[in-house]
């Protein structure tokens, strides 16, 4: 069986392509480095991450201060022996293409496409070999539209006419975006998303006999949405989809969606799902018989992909970090090193979270990373453990574990010195709801750091334990004798979803160090890290 989501956790905006018996998916990565994770499968059931498309600092400029900036909505395509990935860095440079002969990489340096405004670019090869770019008209347009232009892939330049071709199925629809072009039985099909990427998200489709239009909308639009199922249907805001045809002629669609739990809360952000597609009256029908994304589907008859689960413990005994790990921002400022089978995070960087309301508008270098290494939350309930050694001295030096939704919405457990005593404490950071708008802050935003509890600690070493049971988060510490101590229990984490915190990100669980303003090299050392999901 295919089990949804196929990529659990913060893997939004999936794009898929097939090369003979192999399928590849890429997803958005926003301000996390490396960018654009790429997955492989042969059966559409089991997916293995085989790399990150943007894995070099020269390819990817990111700033941690704008966590919902960075890389939006990649599209992956394959043509004549070459893979193409096109995407937008909304923070630095705009739209660009990278290429590779092997999907594992290496991928090229970015080829920037001039005069290509908007986000969510996509590529389409016609039967005559011409290549077309589809994108959005971007900000500032009274009526947003999807546009198309021929593209010269030798020069990576738009060629000739640049034409607006469709504005969505609804009159003055919100956010027509994620355009993908397909050709079937003489028709050009333009599939997009509209309604915004939250509750009202939807997938719509139009078609034309001419690639430049005019396009007629499907009488059944939207061909996929969950907005009519109500806010508490367990899979919400489905949209931003891509189609793939199998060797046997059958079709599937990948799309984003979110799992809610503990009420209308989606801490894991937007995840990747899949559904079968049929064609009726020359229009696509998604999830025939139900019209909604189901938890399971019968798997197609395809060669099975060997299961390669990510080990629950990472001992940091390799020369490079495994694929599941990310930095927040581009790590050009020596924030970490792998040494002596340890992950060492440098303390002389900015605080992991703002200190008070005066610091809500944060400034960073154009390219920079926080001293943070994290992985996606992928389960509603999970246990995390991390073994850390740290010697805090200065008042603001701290290191520990953090559940990070964004820089202003988090729960962290940390070691630090307070009144000349070493303590472990749990801090909840959040912005008052009535002063917060989407992923931007007003100048009256009220940021709070609430101390949940703290305990004295007599050792430089600790094993931190985080146990999340749905929205209840408890933090413990294990000492050198193996005894477990309570730090804080049953902290409500429901504020860690985008419906509360804003933005486009899902929660990360990671290790951090911060607070030493000097130039001296000082590190928090992590011997190992464990993550394991479970069902209540």
Image (spheres, helix red, strand yellow):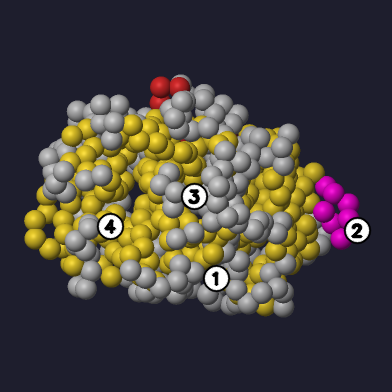
Across and down, in percent, residue 368 comes to 44, 67
The residue identified by callout 2 is 481
Question: Could you give the CA–CA distance between mark 3 and mark 1, rounded to whole angstroms?
Answer: 25 Å
Across and down, in percent, residue 46 comes to 59, 52
First reached walking from the N terminus: tag 2 or tag 4: 4
**Residue at the spot x=12%, y=63% of the render?**
159
Q: Nearer the viewer, residue 288 or 301?
A: 301
Q: Nearer the viewer, residue 174 or 342?
A: 174
What residue occupies the far left of the structure in this picture?
161
Q: Main secondary structure of the magenta part?
A: loop
Q: Nearer the viewer, residue 156 or 9?
A: 156
Element under disc 2: loop
First reached walking from the N terminus: tag 4 or tag 3: 3
First reached walking from the N terminus: tag 3 or tag 1: 3
Element under disc 4: strand
First reached walking from the N terminus: tag 2 or tag 3: 3
**Residue at the spot x=43%, y=44% of the render?**
250
Disc on res. 11: 3
Is residue 239 magenta-colored?
no
The residue identified by callout 4 is 123
Disc on res. 335: 1
Q: Within 10 angstroms of label 3, few (less than 14), some, or many (20 or more) residues?
A: many
Query: Is residue 465 visible from the viewing direction of this image?
Result: yes
Q: Within 10 angstroms of label 1, few (less than 14), some, or many (20 or more) residues?
A: many
Q: Is residue 532 left or right of residue 117?
A: right
Give the quarter of the figure containing the N terminus: top right
Is residue 484 magenta-colored?
yes
What residue occupies the far right of the structure in this picture?
481
In this picture, which residue range is highlighted in magenta? Answer: 478-485
């Amino acid at each position: 069986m295919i089990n949804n989501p196929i990529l659990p956790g913060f893997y939004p905006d999936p794009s898929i392509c097939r090369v003979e018996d192999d399928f590849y998916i890429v997803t958005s990565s926003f301000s996390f480095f490396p960018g654009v994770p790429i997955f492989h499968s042969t059966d559409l059931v089991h997916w293995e991450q085989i790399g990150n498309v943007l894995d070099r600092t020269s390819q990817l400029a990111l700033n941690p201060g704008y966590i919902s900036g960075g890389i939006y909505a990649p599209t992956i395509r394959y043509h004549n022996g070459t893979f193409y990935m096109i995407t937008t860095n909304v923070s630095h440079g705009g739209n660009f293409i990278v290429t590779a002969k092997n999907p594992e990489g290496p991928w090229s340096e970015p080829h920037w496409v001039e005069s290509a405004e908007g986000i969510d670019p996509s590529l389409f090869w016609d039967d005559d070999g011409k290549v077309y770019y589809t994108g959005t008209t971007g900000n500032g347009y009274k009526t947003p539209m999807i546009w198309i232009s021929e593209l010269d892939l030798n020069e990576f330049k738009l060629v000739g006419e640049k034409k607006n071709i469709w504005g969505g199925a609804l009159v003055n629809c919100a956010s027509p975006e994620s355009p993908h072009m397909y050709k079937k039985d003489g028709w050009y099909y333009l599939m997009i998303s509209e309604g915004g990427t939250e509750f009202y998200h939807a997938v719509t489709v139009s078609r034309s006999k001419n690639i430049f239009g005019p396009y007629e909308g499907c009488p059944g639009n939207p061909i996929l949405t969950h907005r009519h199922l109500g806010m508490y249907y367990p899979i919400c805001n489905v949209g931003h989809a891509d189609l793939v045809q199998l060797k046997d002629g059958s079709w599937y669609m990948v799309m984003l969606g979110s799992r809610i739990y503990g009420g209308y809360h989606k801490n894991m952000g937007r995840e990747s799902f899949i559904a079968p597609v049929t064609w009726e009256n020359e229009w696509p029908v998604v999830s025939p018989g139900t019209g909604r994304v189901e938890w399971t589907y019968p798997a197609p008859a395809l060669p099975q992909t060997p299961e390669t689960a990510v080990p629950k413990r990472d001992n940091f005994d390799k020369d490079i970090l495994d694929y599941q790990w990310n930095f927040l921002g581009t790590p050009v400022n020596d924030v970490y090193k792998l040494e002596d089978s340890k992950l060492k995070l440098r303390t002389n960087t900015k605080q992991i979270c703002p200190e008070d309301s005066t610091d809500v508008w944060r400034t960073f270098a154009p390219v920079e990373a926080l001293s943070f290494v994290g992985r996606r939350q992928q389960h509603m309930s999970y246990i995390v453990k991390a073994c850390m050694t740290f010697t805090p001295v200065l008042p603001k030096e701290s290191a520990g574990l953090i559940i990070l939704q964004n820089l202003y919405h988090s729960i962290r457990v940390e070691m630090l010195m307070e009144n000349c005593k070493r303590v472990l404490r749990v801090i909840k950071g959040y912005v008052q709801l009535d002063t917060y708008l989407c992923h931007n802050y007003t100048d009256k935003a009220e940021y709070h750091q609430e101390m949940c509890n703290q305990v004295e600690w007599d050792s430089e070493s600790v094993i931190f334990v985080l146990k999340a049971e749905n929205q209840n988060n408890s933090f413990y510490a294990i000492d050198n004798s193996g005894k477990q101590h309570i730090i804080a229990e049953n902290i409500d984490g429901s504020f860690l979803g985008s419906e509360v915190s804003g933005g486009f990100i899902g929660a990360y669980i990671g290790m951090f160090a911060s607070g030493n303003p000097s130039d001296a090299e000082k590190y928090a050392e992590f011997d190992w890290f464990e993550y394991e999901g479970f069902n209540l």
